[in-house]
């Protein structure tokens, strides 16, 4: 008689991700820096004439203090402005560590998002990413913008330099903002573009996203800070990362649509998407984390649900059980 071993249970979301990542300060252009991890969320900052402008923060004040120390290694100017590329807790909950901030800027879509689902998103993400929420007890509450804009806003940095904040369309969320420095050719894309990392679409408008990516491509960035992954240098590399993000989403939609056409359940669509996507994208970091949420949102969108349902910690785990239980 041959003994059999039961397969190891699949850990919920990223609960098994325990490898610490040390972000690196990366000079992108004069006075423009990225704070870049292997595959944790990236952020960055611009040194203006009289202040520092942050592009996103970090998940908790404790982690944001490391970011502030990196900023202090190159400038002692006050951090007065925070720009939110969108609203997910892993990007914005470190804001309270910057006590000289005078303005937190976000798109109107992001402001609406915070009002309707900010707390649920926070509760959900703490459960999904325990490693990224060290010191969560220090967070005083949701990070709320003090300034909002509809589609475009310019920040003047001194010396004629402009930082454009562009809401180019729905995609990763309903309020994505790209931070664009036209003179330097530097683009902070938030999670609209990823560089060979799993593309999270659980809160997305997936069918709109391709057009939003086309709008990013039309900027013709020469340096691009993706939501996750290494900085892209050169127009060709930036364009390739945008195309790969589009390919990931198109493959997801195509597989789920094929499953729906075949009358398959959500679980069947997941199996179909997994088979289609693993050969091309399965070795990308966080792929296994994002795929269940991506398939669930694609299934909902393709069967007529326009707006993403609010994720709660309970809904997260229920989905995981349906697909992996």
Image: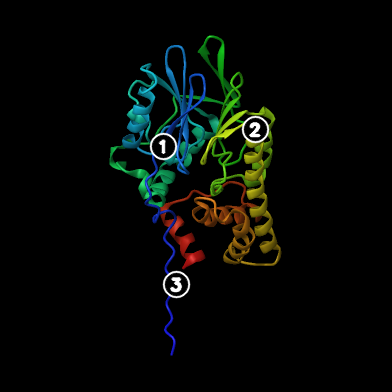
How far is disc 1 from disc 3 in space, using C-alphas?
A: 34 Å
SS assignment at label 1:
loop
Name the spot of residue 224 as percent of width and height, x first: 57, 32
* Label placed on residue 153: none
Q: Pick the quarter of the image with the N terminus.
A: bottom left
Name the spot of residue 253 as percent of width and height, x first: 66, 53
- Residue 179 or residue 303, whichever sits in front: 179
Residue at the extreme top of the image, as rendered: 159
How far is disc 2 from disc 1 in space, using C-alphas?
A: 25 Å
Question: Quick check: can you spot residue 256?
Answer: yes
- What residue appears at the point 63 percent right and 54 percent down from the top-left corner? 252
Read off the residue under disc 1: 23
Read off the residue under disc 2: 216
Query: In the figure, 292 relative to 109: above or below?
Result: below
Sequence order check: which comes first, mark 2 or mark 1? 1
Q: Nearer the viewer, mark 1 or mark 3?
A: 1
Read off the residue under disc 3: 7
Answer yes or no: do the residues labelled 2 and 3 have beta carbons within 8 Å? no
Question: Quick check: can you spot residue 103?
Answer: no
SS assignment at label 3:
loop
Mark 1 nearby-residue class (10 Å; few <14, some 14–19, many ≥20): some
Residue 265 left/right relative to 118: right
- What residue appears at the point 60 percent right and 40 percent down from the top-left corner? 171
């Amino acid at each position: 008689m041959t003994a059999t071993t039961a397969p190891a249970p699949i850990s919920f979301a990223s609960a098994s991700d325990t490898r610490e990542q040390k972000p690196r300060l990366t000079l992108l252009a004069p006075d423009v820096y990225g704070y870049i991890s292997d595959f944790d969320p990236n952020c960055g900052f611009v040194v203006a004439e009289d202040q520092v402008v942050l592009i996103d923060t970090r998940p908790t004040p404790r982690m944001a203090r490391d970011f502030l120390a990196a900023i202090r290694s190159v400038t002692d100017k006050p951090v007065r402005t925070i720009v939110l590329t969108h609203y997910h807790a892993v990007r914005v909950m470190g804001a309270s560590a910057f006590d000289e901030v005078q303005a937190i800027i976000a798109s109107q879509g992001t402001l609406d998002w915070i009002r309707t689902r900010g707390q649920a998103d926070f509760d959900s993400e703490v459960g999904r990413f325990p490693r990224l929420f060290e010191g969560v007890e220090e967070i005083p509450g949701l990070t709320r913008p003090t300034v909002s804009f509809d589609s475009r806003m310019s920040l003047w940095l001194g010396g004629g330099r402009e930082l454009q904040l562009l809401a180019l369309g729905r995609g990763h969320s309903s309020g994505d903002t790209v931070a664009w420095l036209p003179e330097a050719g530097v683009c902070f894309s938030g999670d609209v573009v990823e560089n060979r990392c799993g593309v999270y679409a659980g809160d997305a408008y997936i069918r709109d996203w391709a057009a939003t990516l086309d709008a990013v491509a039309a900027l013709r960035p020469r340096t691009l800070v993706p939501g996750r992954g290494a900085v892209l240098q050169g127009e060709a590399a930036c364009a390739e990362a945008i195309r790969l993000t589009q390919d990931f989403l198109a493959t997801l939609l195509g597989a789920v649509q094929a499953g729906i056409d075949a009358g398959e359940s959500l679980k069947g669509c997941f199996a179909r998407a997994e088979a289609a996507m693993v050969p091309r994208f399965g070795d990308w970091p966080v792929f296994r984390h994002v795929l269940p949420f991506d398939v669930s949102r694609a299934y909902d969108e393709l069967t007529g649900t326009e707006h993403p349902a609010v994720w709660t910690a309970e809904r997260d785990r229920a989905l995981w059980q349906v697909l992996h239980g």
